Image (tube, rainbow, N blue to C red):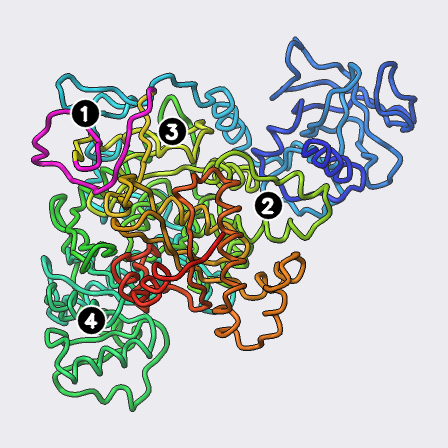
């Protein structure tokens, strides 16, 4: 059914003469032939050639001489010296002059060549409403041959099929490494890039006028070039140096990042100062603890509200080390400038003025200097600072480049590529991806920070690469399928969920957006990722790939849970706290987090996180927290419901008692009605069963609420993972009551 719908869409595009914007690569790949040719003669309307399947159309026929054929149908030694064009529509009927050379492309049908409006291999900036659907050869860009050569190379070097995705080193520890490298790599192919600062300098030298950073602080995406960012960064670095924050020191960056945030960040890097990013949604006590432990004297703030909050904390004696606050976006009023003597406050323009008036050359870092102190998300306790050097980050970045852009894979990136910066720069994952885009010369468009505008931001920017966390993909999948559920049967059938949920989300995302989807696994301590899917692997969602090119991975015993690996002391290794297993082909599957497994009274272990990921896809709930006790034989949970969806589902059900509860207007009272709780419990049980959950994984009792679990309330980490102990404490009374009460499914 999906093929039929796509076919109808393509026919509409071709014969209505309304072209959709395509890149040169897309047009080339879709065309069956591409040729630089000279038109010798035009013949008037001709009947269709014998054997043609295009019934009911007359055609214009041209005699041509092929100067250079870029692409031809398989098994053809040369292209025919005649081409046809549809003439039923004035727009679609090509008016080609004899004696003129053109670049044409099209389809091959019934032994004949056709060229139509939407089949042309045109420059990427070609207007989509252009009726002149041919390109004279004299107007073809000079680099066209080079562009097509790169495209053809990518076509010829499709991702190979692997039977083994990692190799096992000799010894009883069963250490796994990436098969694409001889040993874990330590840096990028360009030997002059040994620090993050040198990575930026290299691209500034290669592409000074290419777009680099852009945001929407002025309503639309406005970009600064690589050279512009470099100049502002060195001025920012000079200002930092003037304020007494110098090589080897640390400085904080707080809030949602913008172009100014990143300029300030690069200014710190230019002077060899370590970054200490602060999550915008961390709790106050956590922020104060980080500032104190890192002895921060300078903090850049994204907003006036955040700056005032820090000034208040300074006055209260909570962040004594802080001496200077810089407002990154907006200007300070005279009132806000009148700070206490022990606290200097400047807006970004005032700060840059200091740098211009007191300019010093960059004092760049060394490869083993600390680039950043990232604080872990704290699912099991207080956040802990992780020091990562420039070499740490570059090794991970080089691994991405090796896995994507070097043989046997040939992904091509350039200044035309755009990365959508969605994640916080307090997340090492975001630093990794931006470092990669800088290395290949792409541009970075920054997210506004409002989840409701996420799709709009993506539509405006039109990125070629984006990094997301699983919760966002799951939410997007849920929203789309919720809308599909309201559509006619035909539409529902095309997007039906199959097999297990996680692979379904993975496949849906890959197919819906028409691009590769890579899944990685790792932690802050290992530079964001320790494993990564290989290009061409379409089995995502069932595993997290093989060891990354910069990593070694092994499993050790968890005897109390019955997980056995091999004899191992574990010294010198990062212990992730996750339970995993090696697949026969050398890819890693994560079973669960060690502290997210519950042992119930009957002795069975269940995975809370896996259950939450599945139930969270139900249209009736926004979030689910699952917990259990070793003294009880079943699980209970807290469900943050979609009130509107729940009422609608009850209304169309046959549950009379739940329908009677609809008369209750107060949402809190409505959700605590026993028939409503029973309705949701039954729904989640049936939903989970349909997705493969076992009976022991069923939530037997549930507490309903509309209050979201948030990082601000301390119930989620800044990276949106559930913090189990705080959730248990928050809902302790409800959990106790659920275990004491009786609820039949």
- Foreground disc of the pair 4, 3: 4
Q: Earlier in the sequence, mark 3 or mark 1?
A: 1
Mark before the other along the chain sequence, 4 or 1: 1
Categorize mark 2 by other alpha carbons within 10 Å: few (<14), some (14-19), many (20+): few
Q: Are marks 2 and 4 in contact (CB under 8 Å)?
A: no
> Where is mark 3, residue-wise?
534
N-term mark: 2 or 1: 2
Q: Nearer the viewer, mark 2 or mark 3?
A: 3
Residue 236 locus on image (x, y percent): 24, 65
Question: Is the C-beta separation of discs 2 and 3 under 8 Å?
Answer: no
State the SS at label 3: loop
Residues under labels 2 and 3: Cα distance? 32 Å
Q: CA distance from mark 2 to mark 4?
A: 51 Å
Residue 374, by quadrant, is bottom left
C-alpha span from label 2 to label 1: 49 Å
- Name the residue carrying label 1: 175
Q: Which stretch appears magenta?
A: 560-584
Query: Label for residue 285?
Result: 4
Local secondary structure at mark 2: loop
- State the residue in front, 729 or 325: 729
Residue drawn at 72 percent across, 43 percent down: 489
The disc at residue 125 is: 2
Q: Main secondary structure of the magenta part?
A: loop
């Amino acid at each position: 059914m999906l093929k039929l719908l796509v076919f109808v869409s393509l026919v509409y595009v071709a014969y209505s003469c309304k072209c959709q914007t395509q890149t040169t690569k897309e047009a080339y790949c879709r065309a069956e032939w591409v040729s630089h040719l000279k038109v010798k003669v035009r013949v008037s309307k001709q009947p269709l050639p014998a054997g043609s399947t295009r019934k009911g159309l007359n055609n214009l026929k041209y005699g041509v001489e092929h100067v250079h054929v870029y692409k031809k149908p398989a098994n053809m030694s040369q292209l025919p010296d005649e081409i046809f064009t549809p003439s039923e529509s004035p727009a679609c009927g090509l008016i080609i002059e004899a004696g003129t050379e053109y670049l044409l492309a099209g389809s091959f049908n019934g032994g004949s060549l056709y060229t139509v409006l939407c089949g042309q291999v045109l420059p990427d900036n070609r207007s989509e409403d252009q009726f002149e659907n041919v390109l004279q050869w004299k107007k073809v860009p000079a680099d066209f041959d080079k562009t097509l050569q790169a495209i053809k190379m990518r076509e010829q070097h499709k991702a190979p099929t692997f039977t083994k995705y990692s190799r096992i080193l000799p010894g009883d520890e069963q250490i796994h490494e990436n098969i694409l490298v001889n040993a874990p790599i330590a840096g990028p192919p360009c030997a002059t890039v040994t620090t993050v600062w040198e990575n930026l300098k290299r691209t500034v030298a290669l592409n000074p006028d290419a777009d680099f950073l852009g945001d929407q602080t002025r309503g639309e995406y406005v970009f600064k070039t690589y050279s512009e960012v470099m100049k502002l960064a060195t001025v920012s670095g000079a200002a930092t140096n003037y304020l007494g924050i110098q090589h080897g020191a640390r400085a904080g960056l707080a809030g949602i990042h913008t172009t100014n945030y990143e300029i300030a960040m690069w200014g710190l890097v230019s002077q060899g100062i370590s970054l200490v990013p602060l999550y915008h949604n961390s709790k106050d006590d956590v922020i104060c603890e980080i500032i104190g432990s890192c002895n921060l004297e300078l903090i850049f703030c994204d907003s006036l509200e955040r700056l005032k909050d820090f000034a208040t904390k300074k006055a209260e004696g909570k962040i004594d080390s802080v001496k200077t606050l810089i407002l990154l976006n907006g200007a300070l009023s005279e009132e806000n400038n009148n700070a206490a003597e022990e606290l200097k406050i400047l807006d970004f323009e005032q700060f840059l003025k200091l740098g211009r008036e007191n300019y010093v050359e960059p004092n760049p870092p060394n490869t083993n200097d600390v680039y950043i102190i990232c604080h872990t998300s704290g699912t099991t306790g207080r956040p802990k600072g992780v020091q990562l050097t420039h070499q740490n980050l570059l090794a991970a970045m080089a691994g991405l480049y090796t896995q994507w852009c070097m043989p046997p894979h040939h992904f091509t990136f350039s200044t035309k590529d755009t990365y959508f910066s969605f994640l916080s720069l307090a997340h090492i994952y975001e630093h990794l991806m931006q470092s990669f885009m800088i290395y290949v010369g792409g541009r970075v468009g920054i997210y506004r920070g409002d989840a409701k505008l996420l799709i709009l931001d993506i539509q405006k920017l039109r990125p070629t690469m984006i990094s997301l966390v699983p919760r966002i993909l799951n939410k997007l999948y849920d929203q789309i399928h919720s809308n599909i559920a309201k559509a006619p049967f035909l539409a529902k059938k095309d997007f039906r969920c199959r097999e297990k949920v996680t692979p379904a989300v993975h496949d849906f995302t890959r197919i819906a957006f028409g691009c590769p989807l890579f899944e990685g696994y790792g932690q802050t301590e290992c530079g964001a990722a320790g494993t990564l899917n290989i290009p061409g692997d379409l089995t995502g969602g069932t595993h997290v790939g093989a060891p990354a090119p910069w990593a070694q991975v092994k499993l050790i015993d968890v005897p109390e849970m019955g997980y056995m690996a091999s004899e191992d002391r574990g010294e010198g290794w990062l212990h992730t706290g996750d339970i995993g297993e090696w697949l026969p082909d050398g890819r890693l599957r994560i079973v669960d987090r060690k502290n997210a497994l519950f042992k119930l009274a009957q002795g069975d272990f269940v995975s809370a996180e896996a259950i939450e990921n599945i139930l969270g896809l139900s249209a009736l709930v926004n979030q689910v927290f699952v917990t259990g006790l070793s003294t009880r034989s079943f699980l209970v949970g807290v469900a943050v419901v979609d009130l509107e969806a729940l009422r609608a589902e009850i209304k169309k059900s046959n549950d009379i008692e739940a329908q009677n509860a609809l008369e209750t207007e107060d949402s809190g009272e409505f959700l605590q009605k026993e028939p409503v709780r029973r309705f949701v419990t039954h729904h989640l049980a049936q939903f989970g069963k349909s997705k493969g959950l076992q009976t022991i994984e069923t939530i037997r009792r549930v507490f309903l609420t509309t209050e979201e679990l948030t990082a601000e309330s301390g119930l989620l980490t800044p990276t949106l993972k559930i913090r189990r102990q705080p959730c248990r404490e928050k809902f302790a009374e409800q959990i106790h009551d659920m275990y004491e009460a009786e609820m039949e499914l």
